[in-house]
């Protein structure tokens, strides 16, 4: 075939497309197990960070197995679902289901002689999904720590929810108000008092909608765990 002909160029281009596509497909398939393992360990990292354990990804599993003593999956009544692995629950899928059909994962940690309850969060920011974890102390009211992430929030604005200075605002805040109602923590524009226990933190300048998303997802997700929390509170009172 004449290498200078249009026919040769056409077939050569097709051959190159097929070769490159096959190579990319092979690479993607080969890397999938490694990518899945990295995601799994990063999830462990995030859960640990809410209770103050900051560790490299490759060392996360050892500490996770040491300090996360229970992985529970609850139904909407706060009862344990024995046949569902909490770690593999996909919140993005669960949120598409009716509330009474969802699975609610919960992680229990014992660290430095303290018990913590870690709740996964997921909601919507300005542009796309936001998610994270919140760790509550044994009173299931006071926050030990949080971690947030996002899919597409604006750099320098909404994306700042991932920064330490924003996450630290939630430490020692409370999720129940003085009347005993679960209100979560409100990310409030113009708030600057930073008083602990008033259910409020100051927002990120220029990121009101992302802040509202954090408020909404924390309140909505924690509300689903109320039946379980109430059981824990009654159990604690009974042992006094």
Image (cartoon, rainbow, N blue to C red):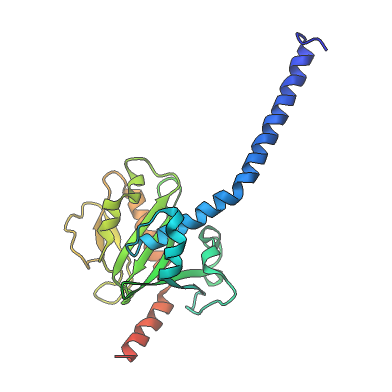
Name the quadrant containing residue 23: top right
Residue 239: % across, % down: 33, 90
Is residue 47 placed above or below 69 in the rendered structure?
A: above
Residue 61: % across, % down: 47, 61
Q: Quadrant of the N terminus?
A: top right
Residue at image location 67% in from the left, 39% down from the top:
25
Q: Residue furthest right?
A: 1
How many numbered markers are drawn? Answer: 0
Residue at image location 32% in from the left, 43% down from the top:
157
Residue at image location 27% in from the left, 57% down from the top:
168
Residue at image location 46% in from the left, 58% down from the top:
43
114 vs 97, left or right, is left
210 vs 172, left or right, is right
Residue 200: % across, % down: 25, 61
Residue 85: % across, % down: 56, 69
Q: Closest to the observer: 227 or 64?
A: 64
Q: Quadrant of the C terminus?
A: bottom left
23 vs 60, left or right, is right
Is residue 113 placed above or below 18 in the rendered structure?
A: below
Q: Closest to the observer: 172 or 217?
A: 172
Q: Residue furthest left?
A: 193
């Amino acid at each position: 075939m004449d290498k200078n002909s249009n026919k040769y160029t056409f077939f050569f281009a097709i051959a190159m497309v097929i070769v490159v596509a096959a190579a990319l497909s092979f690479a993607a398939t080969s890397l999938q197990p490694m990518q899945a393992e990295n995601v799994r360990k990063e999830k462990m990292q995030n859960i640990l960070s809410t209770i103050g354990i900051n560790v490299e990804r490759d060392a996360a599993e050892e500490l996770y197995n040491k300090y996360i003593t229970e992985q529970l999956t609850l139904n909407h009544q706060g009862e344990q679902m024995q046949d569902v692995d909490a770690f593999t629950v996909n919140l993005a899928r669960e949120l598409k289901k009716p509330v009474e059909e969802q699975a609610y994962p919960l992680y229990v940690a014992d660290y430095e002689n303290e018990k913590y309850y870690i709740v996964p969060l997921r909601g919507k920011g300005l542009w796309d999904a936001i998610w994270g974890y919140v760790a509550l102390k044994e009173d299931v009211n006071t926050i030990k720590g949080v971690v947030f992430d996002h899919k597409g929030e604006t750099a320098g604005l909404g994306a700042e929810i991932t920064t330490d200075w924003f996450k630290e605002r939630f430490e020692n805040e409370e999720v129940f108000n003085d009347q005993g109602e679960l209100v979560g923590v409100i990310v409030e524009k113009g708030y600057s008092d930073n008083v602990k226990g008033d259910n409020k933190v100051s927002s990120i300048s220029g990121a009101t909608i992302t802040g509202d998303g954090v408020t909404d997802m924390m309140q909505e997700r924690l509300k689903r765990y109320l039946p379980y929390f109430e059981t824990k509170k009654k159990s604690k009172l009974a042992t006094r």
